[in-house]
Image (cartoon, grey):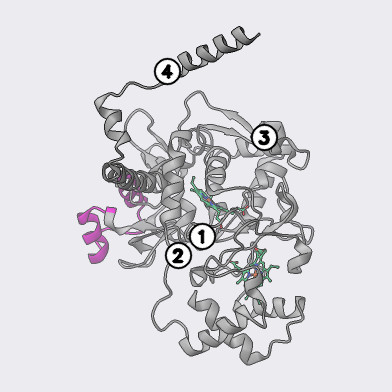
Amino acid sequence: MKAIGFRSLLLVFAVVACKTPERTPENAALQKAPTASYQDEIAQHAKEMLAKGRDVFRDDTFGSEEFWGGKLRLHEAIIGEKRGGVGPGVSPKTALAVGLKVDAERVPAAVAEGIKNGTVSLDDPANTVALLKANAVVGVKAFLEGPKAPSMGITCAFCHSTVDDSFAKGIGRRLDGWPNRDLNVGAIASLAPNLKPMADLLGVDEATVRKVLASWGPGKFDAELNLDGKAFRPDGKSAATLLPAAFGLAGVNLHTYTGWGSVTYWNAYVANNEMYGQGTFFDPRLDDKKFPVAARARFGHKQAPDDQVTSKLAALQFYQLAIPAPTPPEGSYDKAAANRGQQLFEGKARCATCHVPPLYTEPGWGMHTAEEIGIDDFQAKRSPDGRYRTTPLRGLFVRAKGGFYHDGRFADYQAVLGHYDATFKLGLTAPEKADLEEFLKSL
Ligand code: HEC
Ligand code: HEC
């Protein structure tokens, strides 16, 4: 026994000796830990991730042209009959009216000049085509030449970017991460000549799909419709939610109004199952009977032969986490009142128990039942955890348009404050609520 024990011990030593790596010049250098060069590598990596992530966020369709162009044929309605599509085409004026934005930095100089001096008409669909060719329509990527032509896909920027109107209304410099609360996703989608793929997925007719799309209105989209098939709330109103901000998200644990998962979880989900890109997605929670449409379509088990999503997720997440919440413009709120409001927020009004500064959501698991926040549970129940996530409040001033809470049910600051005052019996006076409003505007 002893001899065997000694021999196996020897064997262990021998194995360990063999496993000791050779001292090549490279790893000898590493063992001496010249951390400077590795630090450089980290910094370089961060730079590359940021640049790649920005490109993906702004311009990557993830192969979604197979759906928007290939199946719905949306590009045909946009380019119009004269250019091989259908109908009159969409003029720049109409495109701007449904909330599409134009990136002024991508508008060819001659076209910009023409818009300014009136020789390029915003009533002519041909000029929409010119803007699309220049890739200047935010979040819309048209394939008008090359092997994929004619077709179109959408990018993340479609819903989560707007412009600063510096050139004209709807035309300006990009504001990545700002929700486009002018964008009428439903109106745009319903321009498509063929809505049968959506109708088939939902198990309804095309007329019903059009009715649902018309019910959303500007700044809204229903990211759960194609999971549970519920288009309207019990009170008959649309089940769509507001487009949320994609800025100020670093440090926040769970994303979406109902906490579906991390930023990268949701990105994979959206690229595959909302934009209808070509990728891989796994989530067996979507097999649950509360998601009959998703279960039937096997949304939680997607594996496209040519995965155009997965390799982009890391950089895409990195970029979003790098987008800071914007600072409210100078003079847009009263500073003294905001300071008093902050005391109330962290004291008497008890807001900071959930909206913990400086994240303004809970570090940890920031999920609450509908009852806890004094509203109905319709939207919460459309998610795996059945709860609402505490919304991070930085950059709130950007989201005032469209109202507050997931569906915009509180039209303005005073409405949301009135709701909390009543729900938590805070006994806030009118001047206190006014101070709290100034603080919310300062975030
Ligand atoms: C058609 C519009 C649309 C497109 C395109 C879109 N999103 Fe969204 N996004 C939404 C809506 C609506 C929600 C809210 C969903 C919910 O709460 O159920 C959302 C939620 C999010 C959130 C969570 C924000 C928060 O407060 O936690 C992030 C992050 C996000 N989207 C990033 C992206 C990225 C990245 C892409 C591209 C891969 C993308 N979105 C494409 C509409 C869109
Ligand atoms: C119990 C936790 C909790 C407390 C306390 C709380 N909130 Fe909230 N807050 C939430 C949740 C959860 C949401 C998301 C609700 C939704 O989208 O339907 C939210 C959303 C909001 C929004 C809407 C943000 C947006 O983008 O739509 C504002 C504004 C807000 N809270 C302000 C406050 C203020 C001011 C107070 C104190 C008077 C407060 N909250 C107290 C949990 C809380």
Residue under the point 51% across and 23% down: 305
Structural crowding at the residue carrying mark 4, measured as other residues with C-alpha within 10 Å and reported as few (<14), some (14–19) or many (≥20): few
Who's the residue at 61% across and 8% down the image? 4
Q: Name the mark nearer the viewer: 4 or 1.
A: 4
Q: SS for tag 1?
A: loop
**Mark 4 lies on residue:** 17
Q: For mark 3, what is the residue?
A: 200
Query: Which of the marked residues, 3 or 2, is nearer the chain's N terminus?
Result: 3
Q: Position of residue 183 (x, y in %)?
A: 50, 58
Q: Are marks 2 and 1 in contact (CB under 8 Å)?
A: yes
The CA span between labels 3 and 2 is: 40 Å
The one nearer the camera, 175 or 433, is: 433
**Where are the magenta residues, as a range?**
106-133
Which residue bears the numbered disc 2?
Answer: 325
Task: Name the residue located 30 percent from the left edge and 44 percent from the top edge.
Answer: 35
Q: Earlier in the sequence, mark 3 or mark 4?
A: 4
List the residue tagged with mark 1. 245
Residue 100: x and y, percent?
A: 44, 56
Residue 128 in magenta?
yes
Residue at mark 1: C-beta within 8 A of ligand 1: yes
Position of residue 1 relative to residue 330, above or below, is above
Is 82 left, or right, of 238 in this rendering? Answer: left
